[in-house]
Image (spheres, coloured by chain):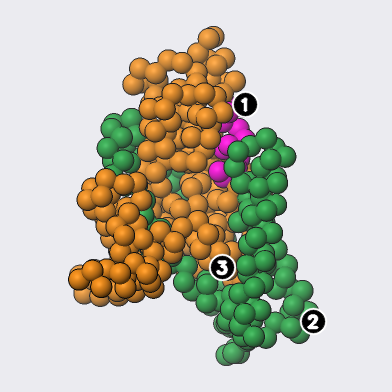
Amino acid sequence: MDLLVKLLTANALLVAFAAVGVLMGVCEIVSRTLTGGRIHGSAIAIIAGLALAFWGGSVTGGHKGVADIPVLSGVGLMGGAMLRDFAIVATAFEVDVAQARRAGLIGLLALVLGTVVPFVLGAGVAAAFGYRDAVSLTTLGAGAVTYIVGPVTGAALGASSPVIALSIATGVFKAVVVMIVTPFVAGAIGLNNPRSAMVFGGLMGTVSGVSGGLAATDRRLVPYGALTATFHTGLGCLLAPSVLYLAVRAVVHG
Amino acid sequence: MVIYGVALLAICTLIGQGLGDLLGRWLHVKANVGGVGIAMILLIAARFGLERRGWLKPPVMQGVGFWGALYIPIVVAMAAQQDVVSAIKGGPIVLIAGAGSVVLCLALVAVIGRLSPPTETMDEIEARELGEAPPSPTVH
């Protein structure tokens, strides 16, 4: 038994490849037999991944889902930022430049809206729950933008640690919801062309949410969404602790 | 050779991330600004440059294409390591702000789509491209 554990932990990345491959195969079968192919195999696989992350987090008490289980630690490397960004960049080979350029300006508009709208909502919800100081309101609003913008803003403004933790949780929950919901609403919101994918990327932000949501919807849309989503976190980190914080302070003290 | 494609991809990703970090520092932001996007633009530019010189051989494309094809499994692995437990445990403020901003932004995607002129869907683009370039093995 410990020989097996030793083998698996010493080859963690290979275990991750095998485990994800088997999981995707099972989900493909589920997609075909139980849903008649209506729900993408990849959508089911991503939801299964999130469910496993919940299970892993409950079992280990850690913060990295199944990657906290030693035998499955390779999942952390396989799904980590390095390989994720590497694979996203690779999809740029499929980008139709003319399409991307045509959606450039509208993508920019989506980026700004995608920062301001969630921020206002997040700060509003925080106010409804009794937060009154500008720093906490700004940090919680920033958390609704992405789970990186929240803590970066909180750290810059000197927010308390529970507030920062809440802002991270908000951003992570947002990413999870985007991953699950997108394939089901794609038809209703017209998410079937490069332009809407770029608008989607700019509005939803979170590279993980956008890439997961688009992957579950239509793999061909991924590079367009990634192209705008990648600027989302940066823009949020730029606006939240500066312009948006000043606006919140003006409202609170006004 | 396949490694040329993988190396090209790695170089573009590294330069993009580096420039994204520099841009972040320059803007006094503690985050990477557009690193992946810059890397994607570099890779697109490299593709055109190589194509023009006739250096874009099938093995080079395979080296990049392999990682593009692994994208979805990598996303599944990414999903499996999210901190779902604390996201759910965060309480109502987390659930309302998180889900609410998703609903609002999805609605905005639909609104912007309705307000802009009609555009080709992915299926139509693919059908048109197939029509323009009858069965040629150069695509992928």
Q: Provide the residue designation for mark 3.
A: A91
Kind of residue at badge 2: Arg
Residues marked 3 and 2, same chain: no
The quarter of the rendered structure image containing the N terminus of chain A is bottom left
Side (left or right) of A202 relative to B40: left
Q: Is residue A14 visible?
A: yes
> Does residue A102 belong to the magenta stretch?
no
Q: In this orientation, does residue A97 appear?
A: no
| Tag 3 subunit | A
Residue at figure coordinates x 74%, y 77% from the top left: B50
Q: Is A187 left, or right, of A59 in this rendering?
A: right
Q: Residue furthest top?
A: A254
The residue located at (43%, 46%) in the rendering is B106
What is the span of residues highlighted in magenta in the rendered image? Answer: A232-244
Q: Position of residue B56 (x, y in %)?
A: 70, 82
Q: Mark 2 Cα within 10 Å, few/some/many (few <14, many 20+)? A: few
* Residue A134 relative to residue A47: left or right: right
Dot 3: within a 10 Å radius of its alpha carbon, few (fewer than 14), some, or many (20 or more) residues? many
Q: Is residue B112 above or below residue B123?
A: above
Front residue of this view, candidates A228 and A12 = A12
Q: Mark 1: which secondary structure?
A: helix
Residues tagged by mark 1 and mark 3 found on one chain of the structure: yes
For mark 2, what is the residue? B53
Q: In this picture, is A199 found above or below A148?
A: below
Label 2 SS: helix
**As shown in the figure, which amino acid type bears the numbered disc 3?**
Thr
Q: Amino acid at mark 1?
A: Val
Residue A208 pos. (x, y %)? 45, 53
Label 1 sits on residue = A243
Q: Which chain identifier belongs to the orange chain? A: A
**Badge 1: few (under 14), some or many (20 or more) residues near its Cα, within 10 Å?**
few
